Amino acid sequence: MSLREFIAMGPYGGYIWGCYGVTVAMLIFSAWSARRSLREQIGAARRRLEMQKEGP
């Protein structure tokens, strides 16, 4: 089996590589979304702490 045959994966190559692509894209999006949410939550917590320090 050559590398070209492995990449082609017979008649299913387009489907299989498309699935891999969608999976990788979703993993990247999930990691990006989680990091963004974490940054927002940290910012909100810092603002709450500052408001408590300034409060009565």
Image (cartoon, rainbow, N blue to C red):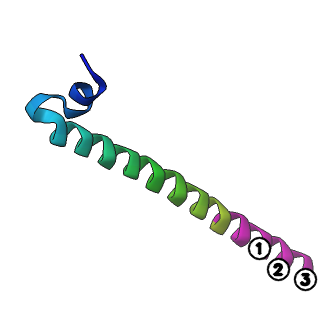
Pointer 1 residue: 48
Image coords of residue 13 (percent x, y) = 18, 36
| Mark 1 surroundings within 10 Å by alpha-carbon count, few (fewer than 14), some (14 through 19), many (20 or more) | few
Vertical order, 1 against 31 (above or below): above
Label at residue 54: 3
Q: Which residues are magenta?
A: 41-56
Image coords of residue 43 (percent x, y) = 72, 70
SS majority, magenta? helix
Viewer-side residue, 2 vs 13: 2
SS for callout 1? helix
Q: Amino acid at mark 2?
A: Met
Label at residue 51: 2
Vertical order, 23 against 47 (above or below): above
CB contact under 8 Å: marks 2 and 3: yes
The residue positioned 24% from the left and 45% from the top of the image is 18
SS for callout 3? helix
Q: Amino acid at mark 3?
A: Glu
Left or right of 40, for residue 11: left
